Image (cartoon, helix red, strand yellow):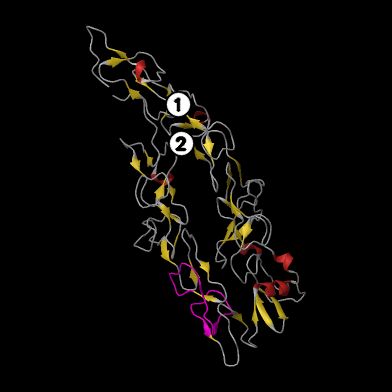
Amino acid sequence: GTVEPWPCPVGHYCGANNSSPVPCPAGTYSNLIELEASSECRLCDPGKYCSTAGLTSPTGSCQAGFYCEAGAINSTGAADEDTSGGRRRVMACPAGHYCTSGASVPTPCPPGTYCEGGDKEPTPCLAGTYNMEEMQTSCRTCPAGYLCYPGGVVDYSDGTTFSPSMLEACLASPEAGGSGRMCVSTMGGHNFSCPPGHYCPEGLRDSSLGRCPPGTFNAHHGLNNVSQCMSCPPGMYCSGSGLAWPSGPCLPGRYCREGAADQYGSTCDNRSVACDSPRCELMIAREINGRSCGGECPAGWICPEGAWAPLPCPPGKYCEQAGRAHETGPCNAGYYCMLEVGGASGSTATPGNSEGRGQCWAGHYCAEGTIAPEPCPRGTFSGRVGNTQLSDCTACPAGHYCATE
């Protein structure tokens, strides 16, 4: 008979009518204990896939040439339907885009390159061809009388090749552009799209006024509204203004939620609304919790580099101080640390009897770093708690028997 109920283990949920833990379904995972319903299992992270049931972390990264939305089951474009809505969660990279390993959204193919579909990286235009715009599936043939360099971006009107450094010079000019464009009628008639990291409303005369704000980035050309700048993804930070890509992963020992504006998660994208994508098909209200988008990892939890939420201390270990990227060390001999937990139970090497951790049971022994108490062998016993080694188990005295382990 059960003496007391066990906490539902990681990777599972335990409903009121379940006699045993039920694995979280494929496409989800859970690194937390005591889940009560499948809805509490976490959708597989964007850019990752979760191929089997009962996972405590994603199986791996989405394969290059594909992109994986939250809840993906496969790493490639195999049949992967969301049973709740019938929407595919793993898709081949669309034409005009490329998808590196771990992609959660397609990246537009930049000017001077082309992407036919399913591309892992953009293909530069060959010598004798050119492209003026992003998201192209082929390159144009260079017209008679003009020279087109490999990967070159050429103005069709006069054949002059220009480079990113020339674009920067253009951005420094005082000329105004139309909505989503800058530098019209500059540099001999070149017409540049608004560059990545910026948005260009109609009449903009200074590119510094159109930089995407801290906590956001923009990998696309031609944006015209600050709401189109994308919030920094979870686990990353976007420091400063005008970023075309996130600055990097959150520091070890810290965690960064969506919109983090520094590597500590202490400042945040402060926009009240944002677009769901650069095409801005839907405006989404943003919840702003003060100025914070994360912070220091609390005691009993760990935050490795790039963490977007604290992770509970792993089994057999304890995580003593706040701000830790890894566990402090193994739980002390005489104690067991069975489950992955955070808070007070995960912050001490000598935990109290709660949350699947505590002092070693009578009839058992627990060496340093024990996950589950080891029973005394057949023919031995121990009436004490907190045993640390096999020798703490005493031979059964004459006239008695000790049958069970």
The relative height of residue 194 versus residue 126 in the rendered view (above or below) is above
Per the model, the C-alpha gap separating discs 2 and 1 is 15 Å
Coordinates of residue 291 in the picture (x, y in percent)? 67, 47
Q: Residue at x 66, y 63 (%)?
A: 226
Please state if 130 lies on the left or on the right of 192 as rendered. left
Judging by the rendered image, the residue that carries numbered circle 2 is 314
- In front here: 201 or 330? 330
Secondary element at image label 2: loop
The relative height of residue 170 versus residue 272 in the rendered view (above or below) is below
Please state if 301 lies on the left or on the right of 193 as rendered. left
Please state if 66 lies on the left or on the right of 266 as rendered. left
Coordinates of residue 281 in the picture (x, y in percent)? 55, 66
Tell whether position 30 is magenta: no
Residue 354 is marked as 1
Coordinates of residue 230 in the picture (x, y in percent)? 59, 60
Q: Residue at x 52, y 78 (%)?
A: 125
Tag 2: amino acid: Pro
Coordinates of residue 313 in the picture (x, y in percent)? 49, 35
Label 1 Cα crowd, 10 Å radius (few <14 / some 14-19 / many 20+): few
Tell whether position 138 is magenta: yes
- What is the span of residues highlighted in magenta in the rendered image? 115-140
Residue 179 is marked as none
SS majority, magenta = loop
Tell me the quadrant of the picture where the C terminus can be found: top left
The relative height of residue 363 versus residue 71 in the rendered view (above or below) is above
